[in-house]
Image: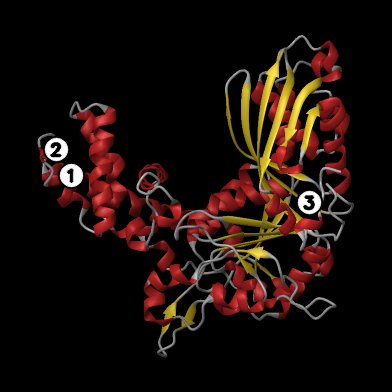
Amino acid sequence: MMRILFLVTSARSILLTHGSSQEAGFFAAEALKPYDCFTAAGAEIAVATVDGKPPQLDPYGLEPIFHYPDEDVDFLASMTRAFMRDAEDIRITLQHVTELELIAARRIFEALKSAHVRSEEARILVERTARKAWSETASFVILLSSDPEIAEKLSVVQLRECADAIRTDAKTCSDSMRQRLSAIPRFQDPLKLSDLSDEEMLEYDAVFIPGGYGSMVDLPDNADVRRLLRVMHDRSRVIAALGHGPAALLSASHRPDGMWLFDGYRMTSFTDEEEDQTRLGKLGMPWYLEAALKNRGAVFDDALAAWTSHVVVDRNLITGQNPASANSIAHAVLKRVAVLGRKYATSIASKIPSSARKSDSMSPIRRDAQSLALELCERLQSRDVEGAESLVLPDAAVDFGPAGISGRFANQGAEFFRDLITAFPDLRVTVRSTLADAETAVVEITVEGTQRADFLGIHNQEKHLDLDQAWVITATDGKIASIRGYWCQNQLYRRLAVSRLDRISIAE
């Protein structure tokens, strides 16, 4: 069974720049959502604080504006993605995602459909007005009521009812989180971190650090936090932190070369831009987490737009940017410790008859492109070269254009897979999305690992690789008939510390 240690702040206030103090603690959503994901996966959870005192919920994180139902938040996100051609052109502020009536867009869309407006027309009407409200930071309801096409179908009262209903649901969600956390014994009677020996710390597969303003008070400079990070890091245990939680990383000690333990690691956290928009940020934060991490040597990696989900994985360190990243970071932790990987492999195997699992050549089943693509990724992840090769026709066409590799699988593709696994013994292949029909699958993956041998003519410098790729896979008669791979070769060079691209010949 996987075991996860929650390290939670027990600080109860934070001193602001002008001398006043504000209540602080941990953010409910940043602890409860991952807790639910972990327990659903069968993990055993323990909670610790630096002094053994029960952690306090951060009152700011409990405000209803942070707890709108997921389906409403997702609907708004689907509209904002269509506002601009490039995500970098979209500026998202806290007001956009919390305090405006835009969150009610899904309910107004449903109300229009109930008023006999066709779905596509209702979507156009709502999105058109939302775009205007977004760009002008104006009242969504007022703009809707002034649109003749909408006013003909919905009254101002009905529009207001939609907005009021979303606020009511948000408060209900916030109250429910408070009640649930107060009913979990581990959060009411935590372990004292200093009481844990190194051996007891190593009984956990991962440490997870939720955020909240209290995390910036008692976690950044603490000897026991420093010991926990060293022990877990030395044994390659997963270290995960969310929101303000990465403040704990500032407690980390130095390596033998004198550098910070996480120097050069890619990571994220609550950003300075996001902080400036919060109530405490406007009152005057004593210091900013993003700036502090950068000053210590972090390679900071934030989302294109503030307040959106963003998770960064670098070796055994997993960080999430903000409360919106709570579910994503939990899933990333589970994948890293292979809980989801084992379940995924089991689910794949359960779909294949036992006779097919014993011998692919005897299999009576004709798998489609998507199932073949997913199984290929799983077998590469498991370092099962022969299993991966068994899924592909020997004369299948392969084209890994960025690497200058093309030809038949038996001659080119099999060698590429073997070189990949040899060069990266800790290879991880994470499937991020798939798009498929029966004969063709497009699979977006992230390939990660630490180089241990020359690869594609690139000299081994033992650098860590994390490279996004897209594979287009076609299937014929239950076998892979072609594979085309796409990635940024310059990113591959940068990750593996190649400084002179003109001296590298990967087609030799």
Q: Which residue is mark 3?
A: 449
Question: Where residue 261 appears, x then y in whole percent?
Answer: 75, 73
Question: Marks 1 and 2, Cα distance to the nearest angstrom?
Answer: 7 Å
420 up-or-down from 3: above or below: above
Residue closest to the far top: 364
Q: Secondary structure at mark 3?
A: strand
- The type of residue carrying mark 2 is Leu
Question: Marks 1 and 3, Cα distance to the nearest angstrom?
Answer: 52 Å
Q: Secondary structure at mark 2?
A: loop
Q: Residue at x 61, y 74 (%)?
A: 293
Q: Is residue 192 left or right of residue 202?
A: left
Mark toward the start of the polypeptide (2 vs 3): 2
Question: Where residue 128 appears, x then y in whole percent?
Answer: 25, 43
Q: Which residue is mark 2?
A: 154
Find out whether the residues at labels 1 and 3 contact each other: C-beta distance under 8 Å: no
- The type of residue carrying mark 3 is Gly
Q: Is residue 50 left or right of residue 179?
A: right
